[in-house]
């Protein structure tokens, strides 16, 4: 049996230690880039975590966009490219002004969109909600909340994003020709304080029968403002997504309903499908390059069951 001197063994250890970072870096990097810092993306992160457990040979991360601007997303994407990212799935904040950046990413890595699409870019596929259809679901809930008609005001982070525009389009499709009027759409730049002040201002001016939150954080701000103004039950509220406060509002009757997406699937399927794509598999991509994840209406009849599901998911 061959013996090694202490000096030789030390040399071997140094080589192993030097190789370890390189070995770690050899794993392909995948990233999910959000459009905001919100609980919605915490659920998506759970999906990414599941994919990571199934594919430890890849390195996966969620990049939280703190400032909800196209400029911030460009900075994040440039950083990911500098680090040699192999695949990115992004919720596009301002797709019309981000096409060049997205195409730069697509030329060097796999590019998917999720939650909010950028169809004019060279992204390989969109994974997420049919936001026009989701808007129509919300429109039906508004009609149910206002059977005798009335005035509606909507609240959202930005109207530059496809998901916001498409949701509004779907709502307008359903309300067209009826006795329900959309008075205004207030934007807040994904500033939670402004989101609430927008609602407070609308309540102070009066004349509104239904408030609609189009982004995940908007409905909780509506809920808080309505409760503080003592108008719970007097003004109808319809929202989007499954923020815990939104679900509490449905349970206590302050909120009529919310249209929930499946952000867990956004995160999970983005990672799994990027791995397929990197491996040369394109069979999962439909001809229209849209992988649609269904939405669901949550109201008083099913909110308790849905809250239990969310608690289990978030506890993981």
Image (cartoon, rainbow, N blue to C red):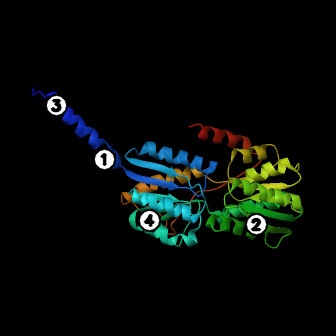
Q: Are marks 1 and 4 in contact (CB under 8 Å)?
A: no
Q: Mark 2 falls on what kind of element?
A: strand
Q: Quadrant of residue 6?
A: top left
- State the mark number for residue 239: none
Residue 55 lies, in percent from the top left, at 41, 46
Q: Mark 3 falls on what kind of element?
A: helix
Q: Mark 1 or mark 4, which has the lower sequence index? A: 1
**What's the CA distance linking mark 3 and mark 2?**
73 Å
- Tag nearer the camera, 1 or 3: 3
The residue wearing badge 3 is 7
The residue wearing badge 2 is 185
Q: Residue at x 54, y 47 (%)?
A: 45
**What's the CA distance linking mark 4 and mark 3?**
47 Å
- Which image quadrant: the C terminus? top right
The residue wearing badge 4 is 105
**What's the CA distance linking mark 2 and mark 1?**
51 Å
Relative horizontal placement of residue 183, taking residue 104 as reference (left or right) = right
Q: Mark 1 or mark 3, which has the lower sequence index? A: 3
Residue 238 lies, in percent from the top left, at 77, 56
**What's the CA distance linking mark 1 and mark 3?**
24 Å
Q: Mark 2 or mark 1, which has the lower sequence index? A: 1
Q: Residue at x 78, y 56 (%)?
A: 197
The residue wearing badge 1 is 22
Give above or below for 260 relative to 1.
Answer: below
Relative horizontal placement of residue 198, taking residue 91 as reference (left or right) = right
Q: Residue at x 39, y 65 (%)?
A: 108
Q: Mark 2 or mark 4, which has the lower sequence index? A: 4
Give above or below for 150 relative to 227.
Answer: below
């Amino acid at each position: 049996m061959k013996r090694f001197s202490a000096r030789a063994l030390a040399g071997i250890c140094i080589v192993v230690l030097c190789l370890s970072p390189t070995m770690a870096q050899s794993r392909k990097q995948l990233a999910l880039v959000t459009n905001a810092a919100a609980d919605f993306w915490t659920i998506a992160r759970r999906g990414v975590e599941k994919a990571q457990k199934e594919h430890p040979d890849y390195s996966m991360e969620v990049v939280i966009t703190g400032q909800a601007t196209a400029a911030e997303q460009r900075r994040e994407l440039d950083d990911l490219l500098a680090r040699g990212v192999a695949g990115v799935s992004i919720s596009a904040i301002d797709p019309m002004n981000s096409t060049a950046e997205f195409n730069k990413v697509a030329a060097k890595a796999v590019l998917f969109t999720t939650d909010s699409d950028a169809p004019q870019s060279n992204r390989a596929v969109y994974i997420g909600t049919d936001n026009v259809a989701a808007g129509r679901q919300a429109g039906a809930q508004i009609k149910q909340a206002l059977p005798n008609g009335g005035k509606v005001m909507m609240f959202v982070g930005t109207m530059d994003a496809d998901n916001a525009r498409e949701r509004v389009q779907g709502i307008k499709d359903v309300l067209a020709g009826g006795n329900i009027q959309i008075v205004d759409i207030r934007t807040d730049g994904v500033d939670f304080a402004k989101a609430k002040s927008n609602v407070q201002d609308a309540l102070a001016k009066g004349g509104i029968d239904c408030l609609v939150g189009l982004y995940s954080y908007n409905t909780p701000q509506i809920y808080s403002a309505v409760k503080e103004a003592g108008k719970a039950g007097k003004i109808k509220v319809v929202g989007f997504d499954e923020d815990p406060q939104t679900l509490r509002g449905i349970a206590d009757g302050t909120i009529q309903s919310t249209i929930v997406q499946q952000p867990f699937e956004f995160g999970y399927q983005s990672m799994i499908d990027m791995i397929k794509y990197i491996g040369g598999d394109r069979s999962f991509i439909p001809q229209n390059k849209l992988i649609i994840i269904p939405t669901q209406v949550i109201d008083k009849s099913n909110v308790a069951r849905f809250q239990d599901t969310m608690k289990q998911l978030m506890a993981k």
